């Protein structure tokens, strides 16, 4: 295992065996690519801006301290548009795993928007068939603060018309496109239009199925200790209005976003909480 840093694009790499590699852009500490044994698992738009001028349109942008439109600042908060620093001392490799830790602390700019003292520690760990992202949120202040947070994971799919998401049956959701609250009654959710749904208090992991007619293909299991799952795909019309997203790219992506967004989290002063997501590539031959 080895890693190196390219100063030009401020990217950090985790390199594993058999063509496994993970790229993290210090801008937002955004994981922009994870190749598991050569297979790219994440979607990143060809039009994504990686130079720090905008949140990255792809990979795993981190949403903190606010999911969605925010009266105090930018949509989805500032964590995904701030420059993070790598904590060299905390990075590790060995035993088939390698990890890096990234840090963001409050500064003048964040306090102008959100007057709280915090330290975020984000660990990205790559193992065979598994990527774990863990966000430790530490409240450095004396009194409690509240926030919402989410790992806005963009998954690559060959064909959205064939893909599906399992594990949401019986879960209540807010439909942000057509409005209203509903309960999911499908075993496999198929995405065939603009989807923007918050599935609340999901009971367990969800699975991304690449082709519902070919059950033998490898699936992605998304497990976390976060309560909610947002399923998002802009579809054709909205795609055209996004400057950093190709008109046809909606065919090849779906966001399955683990977060705690339906309710605010209150974190007492001088305490921390850790939220983790594991993306596991499961094929017929892999052990779980
Ligand atoms: C999703 C939201 O998480 O992110 C959508 O539910 C939003 O409403 C989407 O459109 C993309 O947001 P942004 O700010 O990256 O364009």
Image: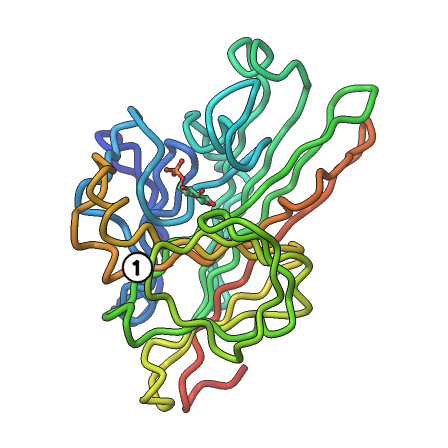
Relative to 117, 54 lies left or right: left
Name the residue at 64% across, 62% down.
172
Residue 257 position within the rendered picture, expressed as x and y whole percent measured from the top left: 49, 54
Residue depicted at 32% across the width and 89% down the height: 214
Relative to residue 206, is residue 154 depicted above or below?
above
Q: Is residue 179 above or below residue 187?
A: above
**Total numbered labels:** 1
Q: Is residue 216 left or right of residue 241?
A: right
| In-front residue for pair 21/41 | 41
User: Considering depth in this image, is 165 or 143 the residue closer to the camera?
Assistant: 165
Residue drawn at point x = 32 percent, y = 80 percent: 211
Q: Specify whether 83 is left or right of 238.
A: right
Q: Secondary structure at mark 1?
A: strand
Judge whether 230 appears above or below 206 on screen: above
Kindly tell me whether residue 15 is visible in this rendering: no
x and y percentages locating residue 191 in the rendered image:
37, 66
Where, quadrant-wise, is the C terminus in this rendering? bottom right
Q: Quadrant of ligand 1?
A: top left
Residue marked by disc 1: 253
Above or below, 162 relative to 116: below
Residue 5 spot, x, y in % from top left: 30, 39
Across and down, in percent, residue 206 comes to 54, 70
| Residue displayed at 49% across by 33% down | 76
Look at the image and tell me in which quarter the N terminus lies.
bottom left
Q: State yes or no: Cβ of the residue under disc 1 lies below 8 Å from any atom of ligand 1.
A: no
Closer to the camera in the image, 204 or 240: 240
Q: Which of the 4 quarters of the picture holds residue 56?
A: top left
């Amino acid at each position: 295992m080895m890693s190196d840093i390219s100063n030009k694009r401020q990217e950090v790499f985790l390199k594993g065996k058999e063509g496994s590699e993970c790229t993290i852009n210090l801008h937002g500490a955004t994981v922009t690519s994870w190749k598991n044994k050569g297979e790219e698992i994440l979607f990143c738009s060809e039009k994504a801006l990686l130079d720090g001028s905008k949140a990255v349109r792809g990979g795993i942008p981190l949403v903190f301290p606010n999911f969605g439109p925010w009266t105090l600042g930018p949509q989805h908060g500032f964590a995904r548009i701030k420059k993070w620093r790598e904590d060299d001392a905390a990075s590790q490799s060995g035993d088939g795993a390698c990890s890096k830790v990234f840090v963001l602390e409050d500064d003048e700019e964040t306090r102008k928007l959100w007057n709280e003292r915090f330290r975020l520690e984000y660990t990205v760990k790559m193992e065979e068939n598994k990527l774990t992202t863990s966000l430790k949120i530490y409240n450095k202040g004396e009194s409690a603060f509240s926030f919402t947070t989410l790992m806005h994971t963009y998954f690559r799919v060959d064909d959205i018309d064939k893909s599906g998401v399992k594990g949401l049956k019986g879960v209540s959701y807010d439909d942000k496109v057509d409005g209203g609250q509903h309960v999911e009654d499908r075993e496999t959710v198929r995405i065939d239009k603009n989807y923007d749904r918050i599935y609340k208090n999901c009971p367990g992991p969800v699975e991304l199925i690449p082709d519902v007619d070919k059950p033998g293909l490898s699936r992605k299991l998304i497990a976390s200790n976060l309560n909610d799952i947002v399923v998002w795909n802009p579809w054709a019309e909205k795609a055209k209005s996004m400057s950093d997203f190709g008109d046809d790219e909606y065919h090849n992506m779906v966001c399955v976003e683990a977060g705690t967004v339906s309710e605010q989290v209150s974190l007492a002063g001088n305490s921390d909480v850790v939220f983790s997501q594991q993306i596991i590539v499961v094929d017929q031959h892999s052990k779980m």
